Image (tube, helix red, strand yellow):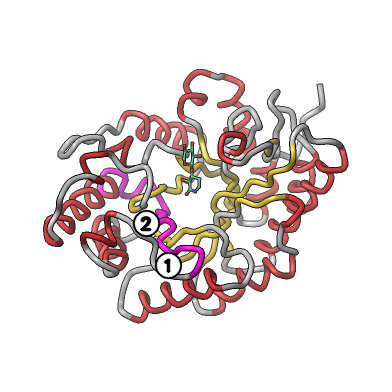
Amino acid sequence: MTPIPENTLRNAAARRGLLVGAAVDSDALTTERDYADVLAREYNAVTPENVMKWMHIHPDRGRYDFTAADALVTFAQQHGMEVRGHTLVWHSYNPAWLEQGSWTRDEAIAELLNHISTVVGRYRGQVGQWDVVNEAIAHDGTLRDSVWLRTIGPDYIGLAFQFAHDADPAARLYYNDYSIEAPGAKQDAVFELVRSLRDGGAPIDGVGFQGHIESVTAPSEATLTASLGRFAQAGFAVAITELDVRVSVPANETMLTRQAAVYQSVLAACLATPRCGAFVTWGFTDRHSWVPAFFKRRGEALPFDTQLQPKDAYRALVKELQ
Ligand code: XIL
């Protein structure tokens, strides 16, 4: 068995004032003791991988199910961890009653308000940051099609931030998206979106960079630092919210070494950006990861292996924090 470094990730991160988090699979959390142990030992923040998404937490109109979300928030409190709420408004993972309803604009706004005020209100003071709107921009920089864009129109985004702020004025509110780690049409569009939201008075605090990246094509540390800095210099907090670094599977030593370097460079970019306050990976163990199901012949994307032993990526992260 590989020895666990005495200096855990969370201890090293705390010394740098950084939240180091992981998305949590709630089934694994309740059924696998070793999973819960490593999570609590190594991380000081959690994101629910799925259980705060609309389909889970608000499965029927007028009916909420907080069971799994409550359990995760309680776990976080017991272990001195922050919670990043994920996510209030998304084009995906919505229940059929919402997607297939025929809503007028006013009805859709009322549903959005009910959802956000109920969910954010329940965790007021317990969830410090929310991914309020997730993935609203398409690859080409246009607004992505969604039930919200169709029923409410582009101002659904500003409304969502306002509703979240009203439900918990102390929570830090984020716009969250992927493929904005490098410059391009999508990053430009997200930049314009969050700037115009803020200029229009929307209570937006920050931008989450998901960071689902492929090891061999990962942006360089300089590119990442410039991208984070672009938003930070415009006055936004930034965070790495869903990092995973996928490789071809089965991975060999060379690939895992390269992966570790990518993890280290993303963390270095965050540490070099004064307004980057959180570094969150999408899972922490290759035992539970969305990558193999979503990316053909890719996997082994996280800092712990399937046996919950630290990989080179883990050691690179601890080293970077020291
Ligand atoms: C993914 C989960 O990891 C999967 O378990 C689920 O089936 C689909 O959603 N961007 C996001 C996350 O913001 O919520 C997604 O999570 C991954 C991509």
Disc 1 vs disc 2: which is toward the camera? 2
In the rendered view of the protein, which quadrant contains the N terminus?
Answer: top right
Q: Label 1's element? A: loop
> Dot 1, how many residues are within 10 Å of its Cα: few (below 14), some (14-19), or many (20+)?
some
Residue 138 magenta-highlighted = yes
How far across and down, in percent of the image, does residue 78 sit? 47, 32
Marks 1/2 in contact by CB < 8 Å: the verdict is no
Residue drawn at x 68%, y 26% as measured from the top left: 306
Which kind of residue does numbered mark 1 sit on?
Answer: Asp
Which callout, 1 or 2, points at the residue further toward the start of the chain?
Answer: 2
Towards the viewer: 68 or 104: 104
Query: Label 2's element?
Result: strand
From the image, tell me which residue sits under label 2. 132
| Residue that lies at the very extreme toward the right in this rendered image | 254
Tell me if residue 205 is in the magenta stretch: no
Q: Residue at x 47, y 24 (%)?
A: 27
In percent of width and height, residue 172 lies at 40, 60
- In the rendered image of this protein, does residue 121 appear above or below residue 68? below
Q: Quadrant of residue 219?
A: bottom right
Which residue does the numbered mark 1 point to in the structure image? 205
How far across and how far down the image is residue 284, in percent?
62, 37
Gap in Å between the C-alphas at discs 1 and 2?
A: 10 Å
Residue 118 versus residue 69 in the image, above or below? below
Q: On screen, 56 above or below 139?
A: above
Q: Is residue 247 left or right of residue 147?
A: right
**Residue range (magenta):** 121-140
- The structure residue drawn at horizontal position 56% and vertical position 78%, both measured from the top left corner, is 233
User: Does residue 200 sit above or below 277 in this rendering?
Assistant: below
Q: Is residue 302 left or right of residue 171?
A: right
Q: Amino acid at mark 2?
A: Val
Q: Is mark 2 within 8 Å of ligand 1?
A: no
